[in-house]
Image: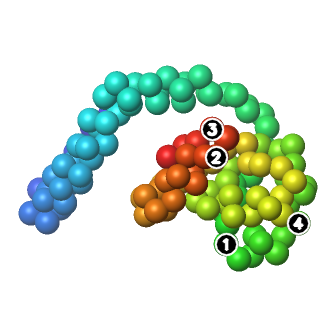
Amino acid sequence: MLKRIRPGDLSFDRLAGAVLRRIADIPGALAWASAGGREYRDRLQAMRDLHSGQRCFIMGNGPSLAKMDLSALAGETTFGLNRIYLLFERMDFRPSYYMCTNELVLTQFAGEIQALEMPKFL
């Protein structure tokens, strides 16, 4: 359904902001439409409902996590974030999946991340 826009709702700043947001989305849209993007979408589609009905845990890697007993997460579906692999020495399991959206972490630790054996979401 289309929403009616009142003339008073429009301002130059609001329109400029909307245009700039659309322009900022262009690289992502192009990447998503590329051959690599199609491959990534296919991989995501293959995982759809893979863990339906199961619970999952998202594991950060801050100082508080280092003090926790993580053994209860063994056998659970887990997502380890950023540099979670720094805790691997004290864990008796590995996260089901690795995830990182921090470009600085991805750039600085690319070799370490690439060596991880679990499926990755980058």
Which numbered disc, 2 or 1, marks the residue closer to the eye? 2
Q: Earlier in the sequence, mark 3 or mark 1?
A: 1
Tell me whether circle 2 and circle 4 mark residues in contact (CB < 8 Å): no
Task: Return the x and y of residue 67 as percentages of the image width and height.
Answer: 82, 75
Q: Kindly identify which numbered label has been placed on residue 119.
A: 3
In the rendered structure, which amino acid carries the disc numbered 1? Gly
Label 1: which secondary element: loop
Q: Compared with residue 90, is residue 32 higher up or lower down, i.e. above or below?
A: above
Q: Compared with residue 37, is residue 87 higher up or lower down, i.e. above or below?
A: below
Which numbered disc, 2 or 4, marks the residue closer to the eye? 2
Q: Who is closer to the viewer here, 9 or 52?
A: 52
Left or right of 27 in this view: 69: right
- Residue topped by disc 2: 116
Label 2: which secondary element: loop
Task: Return the x and y of residue 46 as percentages of the image width and height.
Answer: 59, 22
- Residue topped by disc 4: 69
